[in-house]
Image (cartoon, rainbow, N blue to C red):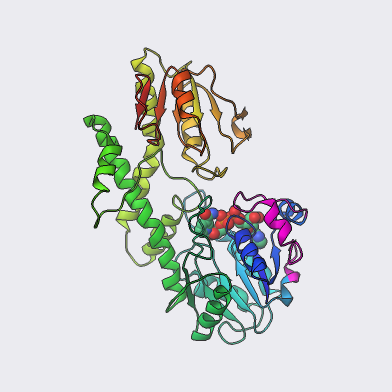
Amino acid sequence: MKIGVIGLGYVGLPLVVAFAEAGHDVVGVDVNARVVGSLNDGKSHIEDVPDETLAAISGRFHASPRYADLAKVDAVIVAVPTPLTANREPDLQPLIDSGTALANVLQEGQLVVLESTTYPGTTRERFGPLLEESGLAAGRDFNLAFSPERIDPGRTDYTLRTTPKIVGGLTDTCRQRAVELYSEVCDQVVEVSTPESAELTKLLENIFRSVNIALVNELAILCDRMDIDVWEVIEAAATKPYGFMSFQPGPGMGGHCLPVDPFYLAWRAREFEMQTEFVELAGEVNTRMPYFCVDRISRALNDQAKPVKGSRVAIVGVSYKPGVGDLRESPALKILRLLREGGAEVSYHDDFVPELPDFGLRSEWPEEADCVAIVTAHPGLDLQRLVQEAPLVVDFRGVTRGIEAPNLVRL
Ligand SMILES: NC(=O)c1ccc[n+]([C@@H]2O[C@H](COP(=O)([O-])OP(=O)(O)OC[C@H]3O[C@@H](n4cnc5c(N)ncnc54)[C@H](O)[C@@H]3O)[C@@H](O)[C@H]2O)c1
């Protein structure tokens, strides 16, 4: 087959690799000329896709800024961003731009699959009509389906191939064609009856995490007041072999998905005169966590007779999760900003993020800090050294469990 992928980011590029490795010719289209240029030079901007992987598929993949290159493909997968506006409402602009541009080159018989996370109804009511501007009818002249991406950057135990793929089509034929497409790269394809079901499935998965993380975050704040070790409680509860699933508290949620996706559902629900209270409450609790972290740092400094103002505070780990350099919505940035506003002299250390231009900072090992706060613990981080060298370490990830030291404070 010839496959087109629109949007060559965390989601699109692994798809490109999967289809090319399965022997298909792939053209990837992206509006970012830098991304297109570097991919064609064999340089990957996504940690999960090493340059060697790109080299191995170079004969079957090329990146392009031109939608016209999609006219000859059998199937087009769309993986453009679905962010929020400044008012925290769905920002479908990239999706609208890609749909409009694709309509100009859409061919009879092509299959189009949307993968971008979005609210139920987007594929049928927003994306389909844009493509129909081509003069072709969805479900009759071309096929249209939604299949949510389940990629988890940095994860290696489950891959695109071993993670079941959900597919919902506009018609039975749309669905069947999408199933055939993904069967090339996924061991199991799970069919649902409509694109709306597929869209909501993805939101349920992410909201499930968001709500459960909010629950343990709230518990962590309570445990802090009650002087109970929240990590011990969660570990103990997790010994129950049924009916409990363990989630970890932390400095707040980051990334493109968890802080963003619930708002897509909450926004859509309002059209149906419904407030999704669980969803919104979880968002509120998780959004408060960076503020709690700053309060915890300030209390820990206070115990050492130091104010935040003028203290040197080093944040260790600024990306939103271990093993990746992704800064999107990272709570560490919020913590840095709040500390700086409070008059602290901030610095940071992160092997995956060499510099933070917005803060005028470069990654450095915390040599002279009054307080080191572990916000994200990347693999290989030398925790013993941190605890030995720093006068005060505040651990928001529970990674120092097992180390006992008077200068160590855990969430
Ligand atoms: N990153 C994840 O872990 C993850 C996981 C599951 C689902 N998703 C969803 O997948 C979608 C894509 O996310 P991502 O993380 O890959 O984003 P990303 O920002 O890494 O990549 C998106 C790419 O699309 C390009 N783009 C933007 N507008 C375009 C247009 N009009 N035409 C062509 N290219 C365009 C951008 O230049 C960028 O390279 C989002 O809806 C996201 O919610 C992401």
Magenta run includes residue 80: no
Quadrant holding the C terminus: top left
Q: Is residue 367 above or below residue 28?
A: above
Question: Farthest residue in the left direction?
Answer: 226
**Tally of marks:** 0
State the image coordinates of residue 164 (x, y, percent, origin top left).
46, 68
191 vs 85, nearest the viewer: 191
Residue 58 part of the magenta-drawn span:
yes
Residue at the spot 76% in from the left edge and 57% down from the top edge: 40
Residue 403 in the image: above or below residue 379:
above
- Asked where in the image residue 409 lies, by quadrant, the reply is top left
- Locate the N terminus and report the quarter of the image it occupies: bottom right
Q: Position of residue 33 (x, y in %)?
A: 74, 54
Left or right: residue 285 versus residue 94 is left
Whole-percent x, y for residue 280 in the image = 35, 52
Ligand 1 falls in which quarter? bottom right
Residue drawn where x is 37% and y is 48% of the image: 283
Q: Position of residue 390 (x, y in %)?
A: 46, 19
Which residues fall within the magenta stretch? 41-69
Give above or below for 293 relative to 37. above
Q: Where 335 sits versus 134, above or below?
A: above
The residue sitting at 63% across, 68% down in the picture is: 19
Using residue 58 as the reference point, say whether residue 331 is left or right of it.
left
Q: Is residue 91 visible?
A: no
